[in-house]
């Protein structure tokens, strides 16, 4: 069966948790690897997602180590959605310094 992999990058502006794992991951850019298989027997090319991985790069004593964490498209989208809900200082919705004091 023919397989293909695609890579993309997602950015988290805040520390986050990925469903199924207990450790908090730091804010930053993460590579996402999606594996798909070709659906055979169709008159056109179509693929079905078979796996989604988030690439986590080690820090500190684990520097240089790369871990592919298995996740689902839904769990990744949920984590990104939660990240977008938190206001950031560079966001238009962030409070001004005078509003912070109230």
Image (cartoon, helix red, strand yellow):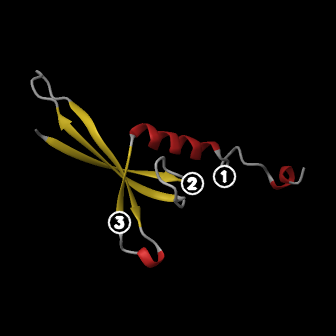
Front-most of residues 90 and 73: 73
Left or right, 37 with respect to 84, comes to: left
Residue 10 vs residue 33, the one in the foreground: 33
> In the rendering, at what x and y percent does residue 66 appear?
35, 66
| Callout in the foreground (3, 2) | 3
- SS of the residue at dot 1? loop
Return the residue at label 3: 66
Residue position for label 2: 13
Whichever of labels 1 and 3 marks the residue nearer the N terminus, that label is 3
Mark 1 or 3, closer to the camera: 3
Look at 45% across and 43% down and name the residue there: 76
Residue that carries the numbered disc 1 in the rendered image: 88
Q: CA–CA distance between discs 1 and 3?
A: 28 Å
Q: Please determine whether, in this image, residue 64 is positioned above or below residue 2.
A: below
- Upstream in the sequence, badge 2 or badge 1? 2
Contact check, label 1 and label 3, Cβ < 8 Å: no
Give whichever of 69, 29 is nearer the camera: 69
Q: In percent of the image, x 52 and y 59: which residue is there? A: 23
Q: Quadrant of residue 30?
A: bottom left
Residue at the spot x=11%, y=28% of the render? 40
Q: Report, in whole angstroms, how far the alpha carbon at label 2 lies from the one at label 1.
A: 8 Å
Along the viewing direction, whichever of 48 and 88 lies nearer the viewer: 48
- Compute the Cα span from label 3 to label 2: 21 Å
Label 1 Cα neighbours within 10 Å, binned few <14 / some 14-19 / many ≥20: some
Q: Is residue 51 left or right of residue 22?
A: left
10 Å neighbourhood of mark 3: few (<14), some, or many (≥20)? Answer: few
Q: Are marks 2 and 1 in contact (CB under 8 Å)?
A: yes
Q: Could you tell me residue 86's position as x and y percent?
A: 65, 47
- As helix, strand or loop, the secondary structure at mark 2 comes to loop
């Amino acid at each position: 069966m023919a397989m293909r992999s695609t890579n993309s990058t997602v950015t988290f502006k805040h520390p986050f948790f990925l469903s199924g794992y207990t450790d908090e991951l730091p804010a930053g850019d993460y590579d996402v690897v999606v594996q798909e298989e070709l659906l055979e027997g169709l008159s056109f090319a179509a693929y079905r997602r078979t796996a989604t991985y988030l690439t986590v790069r080690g820090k500190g004593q684990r520097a240089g180590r790369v871990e592919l964490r298995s996740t689902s498209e839904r769990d990744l989208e949920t984590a990104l959605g939660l990240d977008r809900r938190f206001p950031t200082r560079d966001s238009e919705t962030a409070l001004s310094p005078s509003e912070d004091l109230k």
